[in-house]
Image (tube, rainbow, N blue to C red):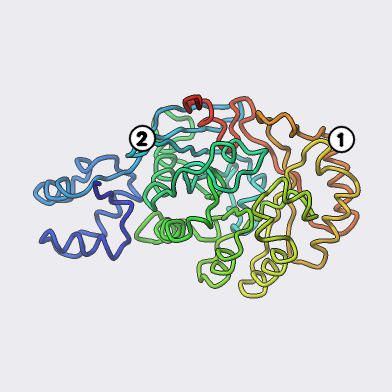
Amino acid sequence: MPVFLTDLTIEEVNKLVVSLGEPAYRAKQLLAWAYQKLAVSLDEMTDLPLSFRQKLAAQVNLHTLTPVHEAIAKDGTVKVLFNLNDGKTVEAALMSYRAGQDLVAQASAPVHKNKSHRYTVCLSTQVGCPIACPFCATGQQGFERNLTPGEIIDQALYLARRLQDKNNSREGERIDNIVFMGMGEPLANYDALWQAIEMLNSPDGFGLSARSMTISTSGMLPGLKRLSNEKLQVGLAISLHAADNNLRNQLVPINKKYPLGELIPVCEDYFEKTGRRVSFEYALFNGVNDSFAQAQALADLIRGMNCHVNLIAANNVSNQDYHPSPKSKVLAFQKELKNRGINCTLRQSRGQDIDAGCGQLRSRFLSPKS
């Protein structure tokens, strides 16, 4: 297997540079080209000696993935399908919001003044997903493997380059937020996820504030407990979708292992340790989890917590048991939560005309199973 630069930590890049007989400061130059100047090849790194670039080329590949298909929605959402080095595929998305609209990312992120739009990228952490939520296209694909740190990072770098593209009307814009809520359960790939976050945050790497990154999890308690002790102030979103165990067992099967009675106290402990508010994601499915009584149950479950609820207009998927709730039900559900004192907003759906929901693009390109 080749070595990829984005799979390496800063310490490993430093060791690599020194092992090639170069002065240590070359490591910072190399990282700047990869993460800040967004180079696609070693040939672009013109302030590095040719002899150094030749030695690098013999040992290291710059990036881990190749785009194979792109879809662009009417609202400007860009969905990209990538080939990985082993031929497997993974997807990521770039979304544009008017300032203040991106509710998930802004749960923890600072407000950027004097900027009309914000750009959020949604990254995958696994090929497929082990959680198997029946309403999720990725969940129906099964789990194949974890992504490496570089495979996570390179999704962001590719989309950052796309914003810099001279043929793009948004030329010169930068990524404002990263959400790890694409394919996969991020906390099931904790070490690779955290290495990617550290590199995307580092001033010698991509240089994005940790508060501008959000991890979305179905509720893997071991990972949540580890996250409570991390120093970087990343945001946390919990894919809740139901306020009672029987229904959540159906919608989010990991609830059978980590039920609500264990999950909610861990979320409360997370806030106590970090001071960071938890967001709860709640996708509304017609006749499944969108009733008045279920809104009351959700309010009762999280009452008194320092949290925020993002209501989501669900995506249409192949599973005919799960259809998006009509707008009237969504608004009634939201009103009931607000009447009961719950901080709650309706998340804007993006890329509906290109099926931009998690795993939907990849599903179209997977070979039919025999």
Which residue of the protein is positioned furthest toward the front in this rendering? 370
**Where is residue 315, by image quadrant?**
top right
**Residue labelled with disc 1:** 328
Q: Indicate the position of residue 333 as horizontal and vertical percent values.
A: 85, 45
Q: Which one is in front in this view, the residue at disc 2 or the one at disc 1?
A: 2
In the image, residue 211 lies at what x, y percent?
Answer: 55, 60
Question: Which residue is pictured at 53% across the width and 30% down the height?
Answer: 363
Secondary structure beneath label 1: helix
Any mark on residue 180, and which?
none
Residue 114 left/right relative to 41: right
For the residue pair 168 and 181, the one nearer the viewer reads as 181
Q: Amino acid at mark 1?
A: Ser
Q: Residues within 10 Å of mark 1 (few under 14, many from 20)?
A: few
Tag on residue 87?
A: 2
Front in this rendered view, residue 155 or 177:
155
Q: Is residue 314 above or below residue 190?
A: above
Q: Residue drawn 58% across and 38% down?
A: 358
Residue 14 located left or right of residue 228: left
For the residues labelled 2 and 1, the Cα–Cα distance comes to 44 Å
Q: Earlier in the sequence, mark 2 or mark 1?
A: 2
Q: Residue at x 59, y 26 (%)?
A: 354
Percent of width and height locating residue 61: 24, 45
Residue at image coords 34%, 60%: 204
Residue 357's x, y, as percent?
A: 60, 35
Amino acid found under the numbered disc labelled 2? Gly
Crowding at dot 2, Cα within 10 Å, few <14 / some 14-19 / many 20+, comes out as few
